[in-house]
Amino acid sequence: MDSRINTESSCIREDVVKSLMDAIEELPPDWRIVFQRQAIDGETFRSIAEETGISINTLLIRKHRAVQFLRHRLRSIRDLIN
């Protein structure tokens, strides 16, 4: 029974990761870049701003919009898990 539960958990985890990656790919490029660099790669907004010449406030807005999009896009998965 435990192996069946582990298998189901593993399948669910794989589905969630795939859905998340697909949703990230759907982001507009400007949002996706800042989301990936800050949330996934761990870069600071300051370093991204210095490299790109884009203001920190603009980067913050893009990340916020990306997060809102991902929350909306992944809502059905969250509801299934809960």
Image (tube, rainbow, N blue to C red):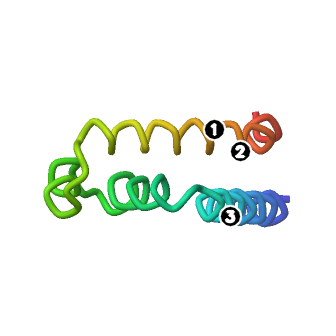
Instruction: Name which residue lies at 81% across and 60% down.
Output: 8
- Crowd class of label 3 (few under 14; some 14 to 19; many from 20; radius 10 Å): few
Residue 56 on image: x %, y %: 23, 41
Residue 34 on image: x %, y %: 38, 55
The extreme front residue here reads: 53
In terms of secondary structure, where does tag 1 sit? Answer: helix
In terms of secondary structure, where does tag 3 sit? Answer: helix
In the image, 43: left or right of 70? Answer: left
Residue to which mark 2 is pinned: 74
Residue 25 occupies quadrant: bottom right
Instruction: Name which residue lies at 23% across and 44% down.
Output: 55
In the image, 17: left or right of 4? Answer: left
Spatial distance from mark 3 to mark 2, Cα to Cα? 10 Å
Spatial distance from mark 1 to mark 2, Cα to Cα? 5 Å
The N terminus: image quadrant: bottom right
Vertical arrangement, residue 82 with respect to residue 73, above or below: above
Nearer the N terminus, badge 3 or badge 2? 3
Nearer the N terminus, badge 1 or badge 3? 3
In terms of secondary structure, where does tag 2 sit? Answer: loop
In the image, 10: left or right of 63? Answer: right
Residue 39 on image: x %, y %: 38, 52
Residue to which mark 1 is pinned: 71
- Badge 3 amino acid: Asp
Residue 15 occupies quadrant: bottom right
- Badge 2 amino acid: Leu
Residue to which mark 3 is pinned: 22
Front-lying residue, 37 or 40: 37
Spatial distance from mark 1 to mark 3, Cα to Cα? 13 Å
Residue 12 on image: x %, y %: 76, 58
Kindly check if marks 1 and 2 are in contact, taking CB atoms under 8 A apart as contact. Answer: yes
